[in-house]
Image (tube, grey):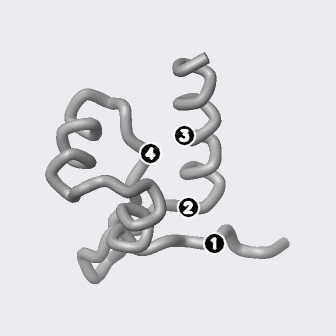
Amino acid sequence: MARPQMLKLPDVLTEIQMSRAAFYRMRARGQAPRLQKLPNGQLRVSRTDLDAWWERCEERAA
C-alpha cells in the first residue's frame, strides 16, 4: 500500500492561490483542509484531503 502524498503548506497555498493569513482564518472557522503536524513541527496536507476539500468547495459554489 502506497503512502499518501503529503504536501508542504507553502505548496498548498500556491496551488489554491491563497495567503497564509487567509488560510489560517479559514482553518479557524473549520473550512480549510486538515493539517497534519510532523514530529519536527512542519505542517503537511495530504493530497487526498486537499482534493476532497476542493470538491466540497466546488459543490458549495454550484
Q: Which residue in the structure is indicated by mark 2?
A: 46
From the viewer's perspective, tell me whether residue 24 is left or right of residue 36.
left
Q: For the residue labelled by badge 4, is the local secondary structure a helix, a strand or a loop?
A: loop
Q: For the residue labelled by badge 1, is the local secondary structure a helix, a strand or a loop?
A: loop
Q: Nearer the viewer, mark 3 or mark 2?
A: 3
Q: Which residue in the structure is indicated by mark 1?
A: 5
From the viewer's perspective, tell me whether residue 11 is left or right of residue 10.
right
Cα distance in 3D space between marks 3 and 4 = 6 Å
Q: Amino acid at mark 3?
A: Trp
First in sequence: mark 1 or mark 3? 1
The disc at residue 53 is: 3
Task: Check contact, mark 1 vs mark 2: CB within 8 A.
Answer: yes
Cα distance in 3D space between marks 1 and 3 = 15 Å
Q: Quadrant of the C terminus?
A: top right
Quarter occupied by residue 17: bottom left
Q: Amino acid at mark 1?
A: Gln
Quarter occupied by residue 1: bottom right
Is 24 above or below relative to 10? above
Residue 25 on image: x %, y %: 18, 39
Q: For the residue labelled by badge 2, is the local secondary structure a helix, a strand or a loop?
A: strand
First in sequence: mark 4 or mark 1? 1
Residue 22 on image: x %, y %: 21, 45
Task: Check contact, mark 3 vs mark 4: CB within 8 A.
Answer: yes
Crowdedness of circle 1 by 10 Å Cα count: few (<14), some, many (20+)?
few
Q: Amino acid at mark 4?
A: Pro
Is 5 above or below relative to 52? below
